[in-house]
Amino acid sequence: MKDLQPAEIVRLEAEAVVVLDQRRLPDEVAYLVCRSVLEVAEAIRTLAVRGAPAIGIAAGYGYALAAARGDDLDEAAAALLASRPTAVNLPWAIAAMRRGSQDPASLAERARALHEDEVERCRRMAAHAAGLLAPGTRALTHCNTGALATGGVGTALGAIREGFARGLVEHVLVDETRPLLQGARLTAWELERAGIPASVVADAAAGSLMARGDVDAVLTGADRIAANGDAANKIGTYPLAVLAAHHGIPFYLVAPSSSVDLATASGADIPIEERDPAEVTDRFPARNPAFDVTPATLVTAIVTEDGVHRPPYRESLAVLAKREPLREGTRSG
Amino acid sequence: MKDLQPAEIVRLEAEAVVVLDQRRLPDEVAYLVCRSVLEVAEAIRTLAVRGAPAIGIAAGYGYALAAARGDDLDEAAAALLASRPTAVNLPWAIAAMRRGSQDPASLAERARALHEDEVERCRRMAAHAAGLLAPGTRALTHCNTGALATGGVGTALGAIREGFARGLVEHVLVDETRPLLQGARLTAWELERAGIPASVVADAAAGSLMARGDVDAVLTGADRIAANGDAANKIGTYPLAVLAAHHGIPFYLVAPSSSVDLATASGADIPIEERDPAEVTDRFPARNPAFDVTPATLVTAIVTEDGVHRPPYRESLAVLAKREPLREGTRSG
């Protein structure tokens, strides 16, 4: 099956931001047409578009749409920023959009450049991270970090795809990722399309599969990586990191520099989204933290488009502040 | 709301074994009438009745029903033994039924005595285990280990209920327990009936709740405890034990002596049931191990009706082989 193209995930049209509605996958491939910035913010809040890089891209397009409509841009930025709190890509993208010319045509161009940059970051990350994998790797991943989450080839899932293309990845264990099943719905769907052997497992099964020796590497994305290497990611990532350490299995975070937040000192400073308990059960009281924080001490390596960062992360990530942008006009534009 | 009585969970009638159909809870309180031993075995296999002690009880009743119908008792025993492999209560109950008189009236009496014994074991376990809890305990539990699973007050959930009655338990975090949601459907329902404050959480959220300091003790049941203290229990128990150890939180197994299998040396010798992958997802390939093994090194204490067993378990559990039966006619009957 043909790979998903970046514009099939999210794109800017003349009077709308169009997103592939991820809530309806895998049963239905349907598009949601957002005709205002509030509709874009709602699409982000309700996870029609999700994944840290993808919500940054959607936010950029939403801001450009607001400019095209002649909306108040301060209000547009505020609405987008309020949609979800944890992934830093959203404020990062808004900051990039608010620097420089606020002319609608420039903003549309800049939003599309942000998207193209994320595609390029994915490509580079995947290449760096695949270099960490040994032949015969049985990889375990959590949530969805593929094309749907990034607009490009993906972060952790991009690395797995590149590893498979190089003949290194043998099989993928896909955490179903409760409560919203991004693994069982989205990652399994992407892997099926790509023809990569995969099995969905209950999140709570990962530990015993590690104990049986069925997992060689754990790869996940990250919604926000603090300056010290602590990382917020989808709920369930932290227990995987603890279990991987317990079993001596490498645990890799794969994320673009747009997910690295050097202004946040540590994981304790990352805002964690609490979502509607009804996502867990609408019959009884419930708690629904949507993210958890994995301390840097449990992370074997962090892979960005710049390469493989090793502990101590405060130093190895600091280079991201100093390096050249991918292109003029995005990071400093 | 009135407590569930033992005969409301499973009972022997003149021509049937009647079980509360746990597959339909919490939406519906409905009974399944099993008129043959094959129907009892099917009820066990499909989880209409589940929980290690409860399937032992149901098997005892099924065997007595076969005798009442004049069925071949070797075939009846074989059908029941084949229904589920992991919980030792099932072969334990069948062995108890096959010792001594095979007269239908004696077998019916013996099966009811097995049930009464489990009720008494629950009462004693709950009292012992509640003694381990400090005031203000926020307990985390997995799967369902209450009245539904035991026919009595429960194992881990019985301990939590007794702890609540003593004013020691403040709140219960209930792992939803994918794929079949025994926590979100059954444990949450039992706690609601008992008026005990509880919140359901996704299984993968337990780790971050421990990291936040929201969990004081983890209590689970066990389907089979080996002579060295290794224990098989519902998939997801092992990661909880690893996480509890990582956070310095006590991890208690609460189980009757009927779940202790001194003939099995270690967890490596316990058969682990693989259930239909469609329980996880019917859309993509999946794996569905129904149990995992927690090594004794991660278990703070094992509580049986005899009291609190501490490491080394090979010695502290060995006393179970030597002690008096709860009543004449069951363990040696």
Image (tube, coloured by chain):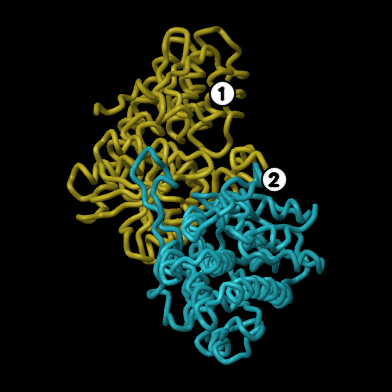
Chain colours: A cyan, B yellow
Helix, strand, or loop for circle 2?
Answer: loop
User: Is A177 situated left or right of A272 in this image?
Assistant: right
Q: Above or below — where is B272 with respect to B240?
A: above
Q: Residue furthest left?
A: B167
Label 1: how many Cα within 10 Å (few below 14, some 14–19, many 20+): many
Closest to the observer: B96 or B65?
B65
Helix, strand, or loop for circle 1?
Answer: helix
Give how far across and how far down residue A282 sits, in percent: 39, 40
Residue located 48% across and 69% down the image = A232
Q: Above or below — where is A64 with respect to A143?
A: below
User: Is B279 situated left or right of B19 in this image?
Assistant: right
Q: Does residue A247 appear anywhere in the picture?
A: no
Closest to the observer: A59 or B164?
A59
Dot placed on the residue nearer the N-terminal end, 2 or 1:
1
**Subunit ID for the residue under disc 1:** B
Q: Does residue A186 appear anywhere in the picture?
A: yes
* Amino acid type, residue under disc 2 in the picture: Pro
Report the Cα–Cα distance between label 2 and label 1: 27 Å
**Subunit ID for the residue under disc 2:** B
Please state the total of marks drawn on the protein image: 2
Question: For mark 1, what is the residue?
Answer: B41
Question: For mark 2, what is the residue?
Answer: B285
Give how far across and how far down residue A246 sits, in percent: 53, 67
Q: Above or below — where is B54 with respect to A204?
A: above
